[in-house]
Amino acid sequence: MHTSRLPLRSGLTLAAAAALPAALAGPSAAVSGISVSTTGTTVSVVTSACTLINGSWGTAALLTNRQANFAQGRQMALSGTSVSQSAAWTGVNPGTYTVVVVCSSGLTAGSQSVIVSASAPASAKPAVPSTRPTISSTSGPAPSRGVMGGLGGATRDYGPLTLGVGAALVGAGVVATGWVLRRRSKPYRL
């Protein structure tokens, strides 16, 4: 009978739709595990990706656009607790920098570019700051020339729950589209 093929086709469609969210969420799992911010000439980084090994959480480095690797950067030891580790650099000159965090286990927690803007003299500063620091995320060291590519100005890292919900919504859309197309292909019966 013709109806015996329907469960098989529906099962294959559902299997393909179930595999789609996992395939889409795979590359997104490599999102940076650090958060970088600036206040005036201070750059700070916060992470929760590192664990305490031999009394050390790890090290963070602030690299200029002319520095190519972690060892060349201005390094600071991470301090904090098992919930959050941080480091900060003061007196940073205006410019574009890349912050890289390497945990004491040797794994890189992430890297992120940040732009430090020039601050106004103390007498010319308004009571309320009129500009906000610009933060952009990249997957590698900042380029020495040209524009910085990134995630479209995204300043937030999304966790596995958010990515999973998004992947489930995409999967539901695929299933619904397959169902509608299947319904449209059937001839009308009276």
Image (spheres, grey):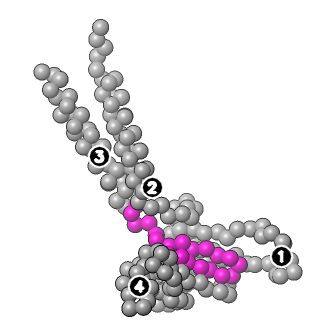
Using the rendered view, name the quadrant where residue 114 is placed: bottom right
Q: For this rendering, which residue is in front, 78 or 24?
A: 78
Question: Residue at 45% across / 78% down in the picture?
Answer: 82
Q: Secondary structure at mark 4?
A: loop
Of the residues shown, which amino acid type is indicated by label 1? Lys
Answer above or below: position of 170 versus 27: above
Mark 2 vs mark 4, CA separation in Å? 27 Å
- What kind of element bears circle 3? helix
Image: magenta residue range: 28-47
Distance Cα–Cα, label 4 vs label 3: 38 Å
Cα–Cα span, label 1 and label 2: 40 Å
- Residue 149 locus on image (x, y percent): 53, 65
Residue 98 visible (yes or no): no
Direction from residue 29 to residue 64 in the image, left or right: right
Q: Which residue in the protein does label 4 denote? A: 52
Q: In the rendered image, which quarter contains the C terminus?
A: top left
* Labels 1 and 2 touching (C-beta < 8 A): no
The three-letter amino acid code for the residue at tag 3 is Ala
Estimate the x, y position of residue 77 in percent, counting from the top left: 50, 89
Q: Amino acid at mark 2?
A: Thr
**N-term-proximal mark, 2 vs 4:** 4
What is the distance, in whole Å, between disc 4 and disc 1 at their CAs? 41 Å
Answer whether residue 155 is visible to the viewer in this image.
yes
